[in-house]
Image: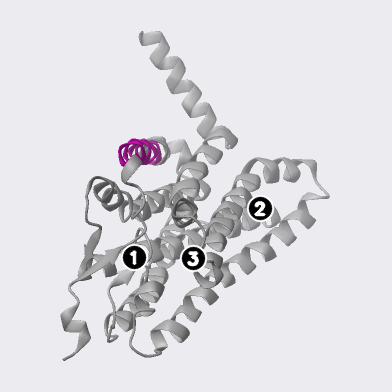
Amino acid sequence: MDNVSIITVFTLSGLSDIANYRVILFVLTLLCYCVIWLVNLTIIVTVILDKSLHEPMYIFLCSLCFNGLYGTAAFYPKFLYDLLSTTHVISYAGCFLQGFVLHSSVGADFSLLALMAYDRYVAICRPLVYHSLMTKERVCILIFFAWIIAFYLLFMSTITTAILRLCGSHIPRIYCINLLIANLACSASVAKIVIPAFSYTFCIGNICFVFWSYVHLIKTCQSSKENMGKFMQTCVPHVFSLTVVVVSLLFDLLYMRFGSKEIPHSVQNFMAMEFLLIPPIMNPLMYGFKLTKIRNRFAYLAKKNKKKI
């Protein structure tokens, strides 16, 4: 009998040792998720409602914040439910859906960060053609392709993983990802080797593009105080965001590939959650405090509300 037809649920073993502090973890996780929604939704609503922020840089930022909400929505509700449940299982379809959303969110993150680097490159290195190159229509098209490419890569990965014959249903994690599902395959497959290589190449290609953009940006900014001011205000948050995402994912990937099983579950869970916790909170906070227009908008709203009181 085909093993694929037998497996209807997967068991998540990452929460096996949390019985004594389940309620505390639930409260802290719920608080973190509320903060993620608050800071990201604040940026999104501010950019949408304020017409002076309808510029490429802020539209890309709005998309990045929306992507943060999209990715975390695949993890936190299920994780919160598992914290209060005695059985930690996920349906076969739900596991693949969760893996697809998490992976595609990461891919879209890298795409959007690459587009933001391109936007800063054109704004600082080629200012005379900026408004003709970065029109609202072109920005929308770029964002569409950033999402559709990430979706396509992960759709291929999900399909090739879903057709595998599986010889197990135990996932040593607090959430599902395609790599761990592929590890349950009865035999080696293209899903485990070739398909992930495309996703890694895509992400590494975006990182290399950002690096190339910043080499040109730094060269340009060295000869102009005005450009250096633009760089410090708009590019530093971008570099910080990219560094946080890359470091968070690198820790997780290195642990999955080479990690020791002797590491405590609490440390394993934190490493698994890191890219779902730190970037979605830090990105909007970093941009909100650093970008003058957004900071001024917040100050104006705060002053307006104080007068009403």
Evaluate if marks 3 and 1 touch, with contact meaning CB atoms under 8 Å apart: no
Residue 82 on image: x %, y %: 26, 51
Front-most of residues 259 and 102:
259
Task: Say which mark, if any, is on residue 146.
Answer: none
- The amino acid type, in three-letter code, at marker 1 is Cys
Which residue is pictured at 33% across the width and 54% down the height? Answer: 75
Residue 88 higher or lower than 225, as above or below: below
Q: Secondary structure at mark 2?
A: helix
Q: Is residue 232 found inside the magenta-colored segment of the image?
A: no
Decide: few, some or many residues near mark 1? Use Cα within 10 Å; few <14, some 14-19, many ≥20.
Answer: many
Residue 188 higher or lower than 43, as above or below: below
Where, quadrant-wise, is the N terminus in this rendering?
Answer: bottom left
The quadrant holding residue 100 is: bottom left
Q: Which residues are magenta?
A: 21-36
Residue 259 on image: x %, y %: 54, 67
Which residue is pictured at 76% across the width and 54% down the height? Answer: 218
Mark sitting earlier along the chain (1/2): 2
Residue 165 on image: x %, y %: 27, 87
Front-most of residues 288 and 221:
288
Q: Main secondary structure of the magenta part?
A: helix
- Check disc 2 and report the residue beneath it: 127
Residue 129 placement, left or right of 219: left
**How far is the residue under mark 3 from the one under mark 1?**
18 Å
Eye-nearest disc, 1 or 2: 1
- Check disc 1 and report the residue beneath it: 176
Mark sitting earlier along the chain (3/1): 1
